[in-house]
Amino acid sequence: MFIGEVVGNVWGVRRHESLQGQKLLLVRPIDPMTEAPIGEPVMALDGGVGSGPGSVVLVMDEGSSARQILKDKKAPVRTIICGIVDHVSSGGKVKKYA
Amino acid sequence: MKLAQVVGRVFCSRQAEKVVAKKLLLIQPLSWETEKPSGDPIVAMDVSGAGAGEKVYWVAARDAAVAFDDAPPTDAAVVGIVEGHQTRSFR
């Protein structure tokens, strides 16, 4: 799992039947304490947490875990948003997002 | 789950039994942000019905096989067509 910021979205009608009705978002991994971006954005499903552009989110980057969250064994998915980050503490410091 | 552009199709008259009747696309992976090519083109099985030049998103490894009912041997699958996308930093 990693922490990232939702930086955009993707739309399109033609998709695998298991992805119908799912929100497709682009997430850029960030350093949770400094908010510095790390690497390239990836596409992730919303996973029912109700995130949107600007949200700082917890992202699962593993296929069978993603299918478990979706409760769909046939979903061709690897990356899914599984939480919205309220705060992170590390090294005695607390970073608040909510 | 990554962005790519369809750059061609692949046809094989002799192939493994479980690969028969699967549409094979040659895709060039792209960056979501800049839409510039990232890495070399790969061959992916198609479930979305994508055509030449279209932007698509795809999954790799085990997640590619579950896209099909018969779980064929594949390491990449195109699972949707991108009509549009946008990226912007909010901080």
Image: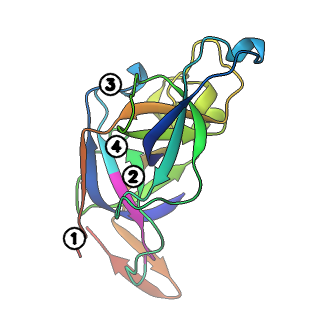
Residue A2: % across, % down: 51, 62
Residue A93: % across, % down: 44, 87
Q: Which residue is denoted by mark 3 in the rendering? A: A20
Q: Which residue is denoted by mark 4 in the rendering? A: A46
The amino acid on which the numbered mark 3 sits, given as a three-letter code, is Gln
Q: Is residue B88 magenta?
A: no
Q: Mark 3 or mark 2, which is nearer the start of the sequence?
A: 3
Residue B84: % across, % down: 23, 44
Q: Helix, strand or loop at disc 4? A: loop
Q: Which residue is denoted by mark 2 in the rendering? A: A83
Mark 1 and mark 4 in contact (Cβ < 8 Å)? no
> Image check: A52 left or right of B9?
left
Q: Mark 4 or mark 3, which is nearer the start of the sequence?
A: 3
Magenta span: A26-32
Q: Which residue is denoted by mark 1 in the rendering? A: B90
Q: Is residue A27 magenta?
A: yes
